[in-house]
Amino acid sequence: MKYEWKIADLFDLSHTVAGDFLRKCLYPWEVLEHIGAWILAVGGDLSAEFYDHPAEGIWIAKNARVAPTASITGPCIIGENAEVRHCAFIRGKALIGCGAVVGNSTELKNVILFDEVQVPHFNYVGDSILGYKAHLGAGAVTSNVKSDKSPVVIRCGEQKIETGRKKVGAFIGDRAEVGCGSVLNPGCVLGQGSTVYPLSSVRGVIAPGVIYKSRNEIVPRR
């Protein structure tokens, strides 16, 4: 099941402006330490015709809808036709893709959201990458630090990879759906098109195209 861990198997890179950046790495967690620097490097090249530059390290598409109550810290790029709603808290190192939705009281930190991602209601997304049209239900969060603060290990059955990082969230494949109130534990990987039932606590690598009902009940999508 090693194929489920790699960037190329989780994401269609044509659905993000970070495609060339992501292609430089094999696994998604390898990208995390470079997100902020990449945003600063490319932000200055964004067209002033289409992007405003309201503060140092922040670029916002002119046709994006950003609530006046949203808090935005750079480095940050907010793509075309994106929507950032009331009291969203963007803590920096965040790429918000074209047509993406960052909702009421949702918090982002060190993330890449592909185009048309939806994190619309009371979500926390940190040290994570969400693929094209991925969706988190209300209150679903990515936990990015283990309780003992030890480095996060990506696990799939007997296989494991040491990330060497204390902060690693979730890597959610294209079109994956996460039910309301769920917790994706540090280092969780969801394959493309997978679905997680509400109120789930998810660990490890979940195959593409399955429905996660509980740890002991994972069934293929029909």
Image (cartoon, rainbow, N blue to C red):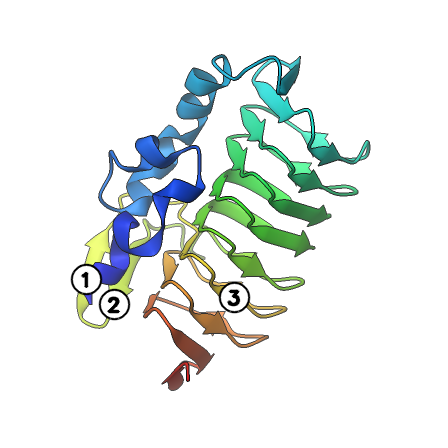
- Residue 30 in percent (x, y) is at 29, 40
User: Where 21 falls versus 129 (above or below)?
Assistant: above
Quarter of the image where one finds residue 33: top left
> What SS does tag 1 mark?
helix
Outermost residue, right side: 68
The amino acid type of the residue labelled 3 equals: Glu
Identify the disc placed on residue 156. 2
Amino acid type shown at disc 1: Lys
Q: Nearer the viewer, residue 26 or 99?
A: 99
Query: Which residue has dot 3 on it?
Result: 177
Q: Earlier in the sequence, mark 3 or mark 1?
A: 1
The answer to whether residue 68 is left or right of residue 129 is right
Between disc 3 and disc 2, whose residue precedes? Answer: 2
Tell me where residue 89 appears, x and y as whole percent.
68, 39
Q: Nearer the viewer, mark 3 or mark 2?
A: 3
Of tags 3 and 1, which is closer to the observer? 3
Q: Residue at x 67, y 63 (%)?
A: 138
Q: Residue at x 40, y 50 (%)?
A: 149
**How far is mark 3 from mark 1, CA to CA?**
21 Å
SS for dot 2: strand
